[in-house]
Image (tube, grey):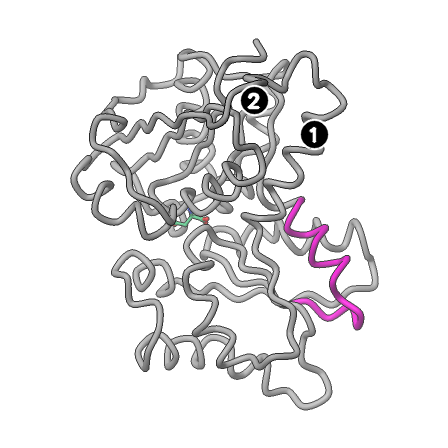
């Protein structure tokens, strides 16, 4: 088991920001990344659809053999983690919402936290619930920043267009004199590349929590107590990554490196179909 790869699942390319953080945190591990590019975006779809897609995707990873799965997509974490835990009770499973919420609560001095995510993530109130479990007194404002997803995929992550869209979403929240949040959670895989544009709008005093980095730390912490079973490939200098996509290998090769922060070799990418649920 310990030398099997860690499965990472996302609706498409955005989860590569999480994969990059996982590789930095666990450099000797192998990863099997599944991007459901045929059916992205998940962020505008209903809860039931996202749950069904996530069950199919994790079943495909389990069938190939993985020792744990990180649900790198915020929308899928928000909609599908309970159903995934029920369907795969033996599988160590981690989403991005709990680690992001914990980091936000730890970073907020005032207890005023803003979250940006997709429509599905915001509608499901998953961050609000996770934050309130840790700090019932926190005030949480969540905003769907739908256009950020397209901006990040287009690579328009800085400059006047990115900043005016960021101002439109975040200006009203952060202009509130005396009541502005002191923490902003980037509750979507696509948002870390937009950090500089967002920072220019919200100012230097707000702590930005990136759920990619916090999830990587949480996975390492989850694996550590079960070291002999889960921590693999000791003695190796670098692990490998294999990529599965449900559509558009070419587009994945074009847009993926911007999210991952490194080149992707065409020989490592495989197109697969996901089987319907039994
Ligand atoms: N991966 C999604 C998320 O983190 C963003 C892209 C999509 O909507 O599929 O919420």
Front in this rendered view, residue 21 or 153: 21
What SS does tag 2 mark?
strand
The prevailing secondary structure element of the residues shown in magenta is helix
Residue 222 is marked as 1
Counting other residues with Cα less than 10 Å from the Cα at mark 2, is it few (<14), some (14-19), or many (20 or more)? many
Residue 113 vs 69, above or below: the answer is below
Considering the image in quadrants, where does the N terminus appear?
top right
Point 52% across, 44% down: residue: 21
Decide if ligand 1 comes within 8 Å of the CB at mark 1.
no
Residue 223, image x and y in percent?
A: 68, 25
Quick one: label 2 or label 1, which is nearer the N terminus?
Answer: 2
Front in this rendered view, residue 200 or 88: 200
In the picture, measured across the screen, residue 226 lies left or right of residue 169, that is: right
Considering the image in quadrants, where does the C terminus appear?
top left
Front in this rendered view, residue 245 or 6: 6
Q: CA distance from mark 2 to mark 1?
A: 10 Å
Point 52% across, 26% down: residue: 28
Residue 130, image x and y in percent?
A: 70, 49
Point 67% across, 44% down: residue: 98
User: Which span of residues is magenta-colored?
Assistant: 99-113
Residue 5 is marked as none
């Amino acid at each position: 088991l310990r030398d099997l790869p860690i499965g990472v699942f996302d609706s498409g390319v955005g989860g590569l920001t999480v994969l990059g953080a996982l590789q930095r945190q666990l450099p000797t591990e192998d990863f099997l990344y599944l991007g459901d590019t045929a059916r992205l975006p998940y962020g505008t779809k209903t809860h039931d659809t996202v749950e069904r897609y996530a069950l199919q995707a994790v079943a495909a990873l389990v069938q190939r053999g993985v020792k744990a799965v990180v649900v790198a997509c915020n929308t899928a974490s928000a909609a599908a983690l309970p159903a995934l835990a029920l369907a795969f009770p033996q599988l160590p499973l981690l989403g991005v919402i709990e680690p992001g919420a914990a980091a936000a609560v730890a970073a907020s001095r005032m207890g005023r936290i803003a979250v940006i995510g997709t429509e599905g993530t915001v509608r499901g109130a998953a961050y609000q619930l996770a934050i309130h479990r840790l700090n019932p007194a926190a005030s949480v404002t969540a905003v769907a920043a739908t256009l950020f997803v397209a901006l990040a995929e287009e690579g328009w992550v800085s400059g006047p267009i990115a900043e005016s869209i960021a101002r439109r979403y975040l200006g009203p929240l952060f202009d509130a004199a005396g009541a502005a949040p002191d923490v902003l959670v980037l509750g979507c895989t696509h948002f870390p590349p937009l950090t500089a544009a967002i920072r220019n709008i919200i100012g230097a005093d707000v702590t930005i929590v990136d759920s990619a980095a916090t999830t990587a730390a949480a996975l390492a912490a989850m694996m550590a107590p079960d070291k002999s079973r889960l921590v693999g490939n000791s003695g190796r200098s670098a692990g490998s990554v294999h990529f599965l996509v449900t559509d558009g290998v070419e587009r994945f090769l074009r847009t993926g490196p911007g999210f991952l922060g490194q080149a992707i070799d065409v020989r490592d990418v495989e197109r697969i179909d996901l089987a319907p649920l039994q």
